[in-house]
């Protein structure tokens, strides 16, 4: 079965640079979520989109923005990167229309800021 | 206090052992409950959803007690491949009651199954 696709898998950036992470949800899933997992920590919710509209917002810094496009893929844009942004960034998708709310995670993008 | 709290672990058990994980959550408005497993540096993978009536999937049994805001996971006949971090996860409305979707994770419990 098709899974969530994330790209790139690894990204190395310098401080103050920008980064764009991409997520392609499972086909026919209508909701995308972004999570950040720092070393030794549990995943923290950043933001979510349902049918291309922002549906919830968590602890996402103002330097970050995200959107969901007409084909349901989503992008997380990160600017003025800081060392503390180094983390695993997961995208998850679900089918809210199916009413199950089970979220399936992609393999993640490992961002290293130097 | 964290919104979802789990046994600190780690658990080290021999193959074939039965092991139980417990979890409590503080948001009484929480609607859906899950156990995920996460292998080192990999994504969380959905192990099972948890229902009030309890549910079983092979060697895994999950229970939910809404009154006590308590969730459990029982693993029977542990296998080496069960070694992972087990995450108790809750999904519910935010404080404003206006959305439903974000997952809140417990800190995870590390399980190591040894020969």
Image (cartoon, rainbow, N blue to C red):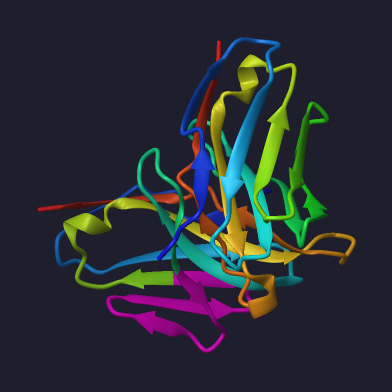
Identify the main secondary structure in magenta: strand
- Residue B3 visible in the displayed image: no
Looking at the picture, tell me which residue is in the foreground, A14 or A82: A14
Residue A85 place in picture, x, y as percent = 63, 24
Q: Residue furthest front?
A: A71
B53 drawn magenta: yes
Q: Which residues are magenta?
A: B48-72
Q: Position of residue A45 (x, y in %)?
A: 67, 47
Q: Position of residue A14 (x, y in %)?
A: 60, 10
Residue at 65%, 10% in the rendered image: A15
Q: For residue B57, what is the image quadrant?
A: bottom left
Extreme-left residue of the structure: B115
**Seen in the image, is A98 located left or right of residue A64?**
left
The residue positioned farthest toward the bottom in the image shown: B53
Which residue: 58% across, 56% down?
Answer: A25
Query: In the image shown, does B79 or A12 lie closer to the viewer?
Result: A12
- Residue B85 vs B51, above or below: the answer is above
Figure check: B45 above or below B69: above
């Amino acid at each position: 079965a098709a899974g969530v696709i994330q790209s790139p898998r690894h990204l190395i950036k310098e401080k103050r640079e920008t980064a764009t992470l991409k997520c392609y949800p499972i086909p026919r899933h209508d909701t995308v979520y972004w999570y950040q997992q720092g070393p030794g920590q549990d995943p923290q919710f950043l933001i979510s989109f349902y049918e291309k509209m922002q549906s919830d917002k968590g602890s996402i810094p103002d330097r970050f923005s995200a959107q969901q496009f007409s084909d349901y893929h989503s992008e997380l844009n990160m600017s003025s990167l800081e060392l503390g942004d180094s983390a695993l960034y997961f995208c998850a998708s679900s089918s809210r229309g199916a009413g199950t709310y089970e979220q399936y995670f992609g393999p993640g993008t490992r961002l290293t800021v130097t | 206090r964290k919104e979802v709290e789990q046994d600190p672990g780690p658990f080290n058990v021999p193959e074939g052992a039965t092991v139980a994980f417990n979890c409590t959550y503080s948001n009484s408005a929480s609607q859906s409950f899950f156990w995920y497993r996460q292998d080192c540096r990999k994504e969380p993978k959905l192990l099972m959803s948890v229902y009030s009536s309890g549910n079983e999937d092979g060697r895994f049994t999950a229970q939910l007690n809404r009154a006590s805001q308590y969730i459990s996971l029982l693993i029977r006949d542990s296998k080496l491949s069960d070694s992972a971090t087990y995450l108790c996860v809750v999904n519910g409305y935010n404080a404003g009651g206006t959305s439903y979707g974000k997952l809140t994770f417990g800190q995870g419990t590390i399980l190591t199954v040894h020969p």
